[in-house]
Each structure stands twice: as structure tokens, then as C-alpha cells.
Amino acid sequence: MNARVVALMGAQWGLVTRRQAMRAGMAGHRIDSLVRSGTWVAVRRGVYAEAAYVAALTTHVQRRVLADRAVSLRIHGPHAMSHHSSAHLQQLDVLREQEPRTHIGRPGVAGSHVRDAVQYHLAPYASDQVVHVDGVPALDGARTSLDIAREHGYLHGLVAADSALRSGATRADLERAASAMTRWPHVSVVNDVVASASHLTDSIAESLGRDFVTELGYGVPQPQFGLTADGRTAWCDLRLGRHFFEVDSRLKLRLVSAGGFSVKDPEETLWEEKLRQDFVTGFKTGMSRLTWNDFFGRQRRMALERCRREYLDTCSRFGIDASDLAPFRPRHPKPRLVVRRGPVLPPWSP
């Protein structure tokens, strides 16, 4: 490759368009030869990347972001990534689309439509709702999460809105984005999401857990409830009366070196969790434990029945009044986990 093409790919996340490459002095037959030999691959029609770089992208989000950026390079007029394309670019936590697409907002587009796995959206947006991520325009987190709610429903929207709040958006940002949607389709879902979103959840699973516990029908659970005594402090994911709901994941036991969250031996992590549960239930409380599969399908129905039995058993043994726990509440809120994320795509080099 000539130096100018290398420079272009380095500035564009490993991508280059056919037009850019030819303007930089690369002959068309040379481009075709690189593709035929398997050195380059067409990420989109007329947009290329090195095959080795594409193969190095191991996650769904990385592959989606590269495809979305390739679409962006093909659009010459004003536009902004929206919906899941915007969420992936900004590293918001979202539930996966059943049919992944590139989502683009374009001012003046006459009607929403899908073409070549790209969905163009009619809904207008204000200039101050556009952020730039590594040079790519995208709708901000608040607007993105509410667009996802309108497109995919309440649960998708709740997960995205919780993540937007964790990432720095405010409730005022959500309300301001919703105010422009008064007469838009599915605005009732948007309003439900704005009313329910919380910055206190730490993950997708905790957002799903909050919705799950609410469905029990005994009230909205309080997230991140802490208890402290005898030099020990424990934080629980969700509290309803005197009953706690903990969302478990194998990743909490898996070592960081193996792609998990634990910095300790799994046996030690599990033992510490057993002691933590003993500490919490020592305050005359009950606890239910949930996993990802409990939130979906037939298993959700069974888990709801189980948790309802466990919650009512706690109520029969200890009542629902938790005012006696007030003296044991931590003086400060739970320290927030600061996740320092790098670029969503790994750096490209020739």
C-alpha cells in the first residue's frame, strides 16, 4: 500500500473507501487484487479493511461498530448514528437486537426505511443532541436510549437508559429528549422508561433484576441497599421490605485473566459471598438469588413463583417494616465502580 492509503486507514479505524484509495494514488486493479488475494475484505460495498484486522475483532460490538463506521464513510451528507449503532459507539450497555442493523439519523430523509441492512430514521434531532466519538457523529446517550425504547420496547429502553445515566447523562437529559417526542409513536413506552430509569444499577443484569422484582407486585425495589456493623459493610442489589434480591453471574467467579471480574481464586470469592449473605441475613432478613436465565421465557415464570414464595416467607417471619435497619445504614452511598474503557475498536496498524 502507498503511504497515503496507510495514513487514511490509520485515521479511519482501519477502513478506507475505494474512492479515497484511488484519490490517494492506488489503482483500481490494485484494490481488486488485494481483495481477490484475501488481503483486504469489503466491510461494506466500496469500503475495505485488512482481513487480518477484521479477524482480530472478537466481539459482537466490535464487529458492529466497524460495520457501522463503514456505512458512515459512505454517507456524504449530514447524519448521526442512532439507536444501537450510537449505543455501541458510546459503549452503552444494551440488549442485543434480534436483527442487527446500522441505524442512521439523517435530516430531511423522507420517511424511515431499511436498505442493505441500514435503517434510516425520519425522527428529527437537534444539533446539541449530537456528540462525536472518534470523529463519528452520534446521538447522545439520553436520546439514544429513548430511541431504543421506541424501537424495541420497554425492557430494551430501560437497560439503555440505566446505562446512559451511569455514563453521565442526567434525568433532566432524559426528560428533555422525551419532551420532543410528545406526538411520536410509542411515546408511552418512552415515558415509562424515563419514570423508571435509575443510575444506581451497575449492569444490564441489575436493570433486568429491578424490572423482575417489580413484576412480583409488591412495590418497586430499592437498589444498592447497604448495611454496616462490626467493621463490615455489605451492599445488596435490590431490597423489598426485609427481603433482598441478589443477581449472580459466573463472571463474578471467573478470574480477570480469563475474562471475568474476580481478582481472587474462585473458591475464595465464593466463600466471601457466603459470609456476606450470612452477615446480611443476620439482620432478620431474607434473600433470593437470581441469574440471567431467570429473566426470560418459561424460567422467568418459575423464578417469579419461587421469589414470591421466598419474599412472602420473609414477610411472615420478620414482617415488612425495615425501619430498625436505619441505624445500620452506611453514612455514604455505595462507591461507584469506575470503568475506564478504551476505544471500542483496537488500534489499527499496517
Image (spheres, grey):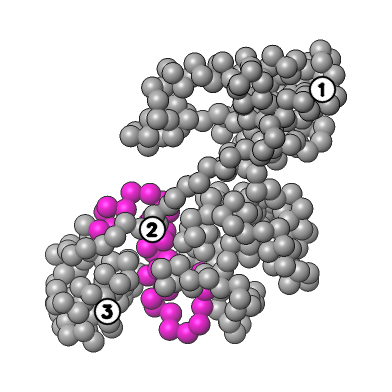
Figure quadrant of the N terminus: bottom left
Q: Secondary structure at mark 1?
A: helix
Spatial separation of the CA atoms under disc 2 and disc 1: 47 Å
Residue occupying image coordinates x 22% and y 60%: 51
Q: Secondary structure at mark 2?
A: loop
Residue occupying image coordinates x 62% and y 26%: 234
Q: Give neighbour class at mark 1: few <14, some 14-19, many 20+ (Cα, 10 Å).
A: few
Q: Which label belongs to residue 18? A: 3
Residue hosting label 2: 343
Q: Earlier in the sequence, mark 2 or mark 3?
A: 3
Residue occupying image coordinates x 64% and y 33%: 237
Q: Disc 3 marks which amino acid?
A: Arg
Q: Give neighbour class at mark 3: few <14, some 14-19, many 20+ (Cα, 10 Å).
A: some
Q: Nearer the viewer, residue 105 or 322?
A: 322
Q: Disc 1 marks which amino acid?
A: Asp
Does the segment drawn in magenta span residue 72? yes
Spatial separation of the CA atoms under disc 3 and disc 1: 69 Å
Q: Nearer the viewer, residue 186 or 72?
A: 72
Mark 1 and mark 2 in contact (Cβ < 8 Å)?
A: no
Q: Which label belongs to residue 324? A: 1
Does the segment drawn in magenta span residue 62? yes
Spatial separation of the CA atoms under disc 2 and disc 3: 25 Å
Q: Earlier in the sequence, mark 3 or mark 1?
A: 3
x then y, percent, for residue 274: 55, 16
- Regarding residue 151, the answer to whether it shows in the image is no
Q: Which residues are magenta?
A: 53-81
